[in-house]
Image (cartoon, rainbow, N blue to C red):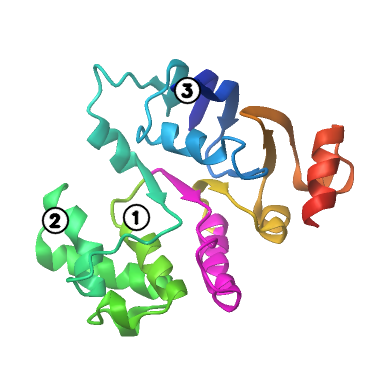
Amino acid sequence: MIKVEYLNKSFGNLHVLKNVSIEVKESEVVCLIGASGSGKSTLLRCLNFLEMKNDGRIMIGNEEIDPSTHNLNEVRQRVGMVFQHFNLFPHMTVVENVIEAPIQVKKVAKKEAILEARELLKKVGLEDKENVYPSKLSGGQKQRVAIARALAMKPDIMLFDEPTSALDPELVGEVLTTMKKLAEEGMTMVVVTHEMCFAREVGDWVVYMNDGKIVEVGRPDEIFTNPKEQRTRDFLNSVL
């Protein structure tokens, strides 16, 4: 579903991604872990072309994506993204937030979009909130609306950029439960997370990044119980 080869990204003199290569197969959940500033979020943003690589290759579904020749808005329809901050439209109700992109971008009929939005809100446990405005929701509820909104575009792949980091601790579980459901349904997911229990329980692969490089890739049990690299061990000792 995703193949990245020798990806480099710099911001001025700051070399943020250094020859990063990674592969994500259909229905896999890949969790990116590492300290802040290690390049995880930049990698995710490059996969959705919110940041443009300096060099390297990005393939989505066996097709190399070239920003100069591809319609990136069409690519982003296939690659949904959920951010740390929910970015909901405050002047729209929950259901209006969910239907906006399908109607405006995909030209879905409003009646059909609302029916699909209700199914998605049911999936994320918010079917009773469709006519509520974001200001009346908790952080966890807002993030679940953001997930429903991303799913409304029927993406092939979902990217999550630290989706629980802006939440109060007691609200983290409801968002992770929603993400676990998606994983069980076979959604291909790349997740930047500080939630090590989630990475261990839900991830098919865990990728440890440090200083813009991939240091180690392995199955969760391998990474968390017997990491091969000293830097991985040092990181896990600091967070577990």
Task: Name the residue beneath numbered marker 2.
Answer: 103
Task: Name the residue beneath numbered marker 3.
Answer: 10
Left or right of residue 189: residue 155: left
Question: Considering only vertical position in the picture, is 5 above or below 216?
Answer: above
Number of numbered callouts drawn:
3
Label pair 3/2, CB-CB below 8 angstroms: no
> Is residue 88 a member of the stretch shown in magenta?
no
Which residue is nearer to you in this view: 167 or 126?
167
**Quadrant of the rendered image containing residue 234:** top right
Crowding at label 2, few (<14), some or many (≥20) Cα neighbours within 10 Å? some
Question: Considering only vertical position in the picture, is 80 above or below 147?
Answer: above
Task: Name the residue beneath numbered marker 1.
Answer: 150
Considering the image in quadrants, where does the C terminus appear?
bottom right
Magenta residues, start to end:
156-184
Q: Residue at x 76, y 47 (%)?
A: 220
Which residue is nearer to you in this view: 142 or 217?
142
Whether residue 228 is visible to the viewer of this picture, yes or no, is: no
Mark 3 vs mark 2: give the one in front.
3
Whether residue 167 is visible to the viewer of this picture, yes or no, is: yes
What type is the residue that disc 1 sits on? Ala
Residue 30 percent coordinates (x, y): 61, 43
Q: Which disc is residue 107 wearing?
A: none
Residue 207 percent coordinates (x, y): 68, 38
